[in-house]
Amino acid sequence: MSSFADLADRLDARLAGADAALARDYPGDRGVRQPVHTVYVPADRYDAGTPAAWGKQALETLAQHGGTPRAFADASGLDPALVEAVYPRVERKLAAEPVEDLRIDFEDGFGARPDDEEDAEAVRAAAALVESVGDGTAPPFHGIRFKSLEAPTRRRGLRTLDLFVGGLARAGALGDGFVLTLPKVTSVDQVDAMVTACAWLEDAHGLPSGRLGFEIQVETPQSILGADGTALVARMVHAAQGRCTSLHYGTYDYSASCGIAAGYQSMEHPAADFAKAVMQVAAAGTGVHLSDGSTNILPVGDDAAVRRGWSLHARLVRRSLERGFYQGWDLHPAQLPTRFAATYAFYREGLPSAVARLRAYTGGGESAYLDEPATAVALAGFVLRGVECGAVDESEVLEGIGVALPDLARLARRAG
């Protein structure tokens, strides 16, 4: 009869491949901040002052239709007590950092144009982004969405990508917040091709290997369910060879492709929830972030129209947060007040319980919950996200939980 040590050695050898695959394919949290939204701006409407202009318009809309916490709570449908608590934070955010993630759009928002016109816009937009990076006014996350790798748009998309990345690389303006968006993905082969394109761009423009990452837009049924019955989005994540930074749900392309009538296309349609549930499972443990889509019902027009748009947007933002989608798309400056108010309210509402449970878990108090390590990780991640977006102050973490922010990050498995 073999010894226990012999058994352990045999099992170590048998499972070595599986151990290596688990560590490679499911590395866990990347340890980086996730923006709460992505703002898409057609390339020809973008300049270095765009984020500040969005913030100014958002503040003007807030003052006109929700000039006090009570008025804004009434208009948005958010809890009055929570709005009272977060209103000053929202105003400061809109003044200082109204856009967390900016995507300069050369795809649907820009449309099909003559090659010389798109070439010129790619060069001009890159120069504008270089300017804003240089003067410190660029959003912390920024990049472009180029045309898809489908055959009709492939060469045009790659040309724009080369011009734009080259412009930033030559100016030394490719920072950690730069990201590319790969739209309308219909096959794993397209993700493989994007990996090849990124490697070529790095070589062509003198960038370090692995420098360029990209997000995959899940806006086709083929990206959820392949012809062979497999969840292609899961295969896409791993085919990206570590370059995939996030999965973004595309509300309207996906809904239309599923045959849903225009009046019923929504972030909360059952078809949308199914697609996002598949995305969530596919991304779990990989370090790939998730983003919900957008609503095209905007808070614009008269007071009644703004109130309807705000109420819908605030509810959808909250719905996404509750379902573990901590990012979404915003399509208009007037959506920014409800984006940040609903997000801040979510974290402020959950903060007392999370703080008490974490304090008890770390041995500093008592709680009615007996939390397991996995739940403690989720609690720490919740509080850390609140700090990163501005809903929670760092001092509240130290005072409430009794740990410094680096210790909270380690508890959330953001750092070793």
Image (spheres, grey):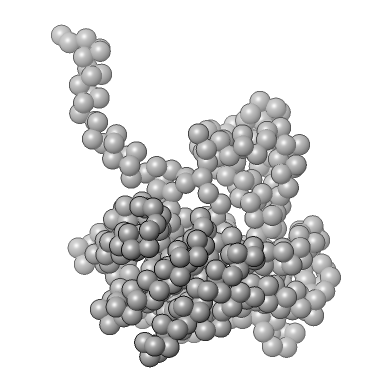
In the displayed structure, would residue 84 be above or below residue 77?
above
For the question of whether residue 315 can be seen, the reply is no
Q: Quadrant of residue 26?
A: top left
In the displayed structure, would residue 240 be above or below residue 132?
above
For the question of whether residue 304 can be seen, the reply is yes
In the displayed structure, would residue 121 be above or below residue 144?
below
The extreme left residue here reads 1
Residue 223 in the image: state x and y as whole percent: 32, 66
Residue 70 in the image: state x and y as whole percent: 83, 68
Q: Identify the residue shown where x is 28% and y is 40%.
A: 21
Q: Quadrant of residue 383?
A: top right
Q: Identify the residue shown where x is 33% and y is 63%.
A: 204
Residue 355 in the image: state x and y as whole percent: 69, 40
Left of 160 or right of it: where is 136?
Answer: right
Q: Identify the residue shown where x is 21% and y is 9%.
A: 3
Q: Quadrant of the N terminus?
A: top left
Q: Nearer the viewer, residue 22 or 123?
A: 123
Left of 63 or right of it: where is 198?
Answer: left
Q: Identify the residue shown where x is 75% and y is 42%.
A: 395
In the displayed structure, would residue 323 be above or below residue 353?
below
The extreme bottom residue here reads 114
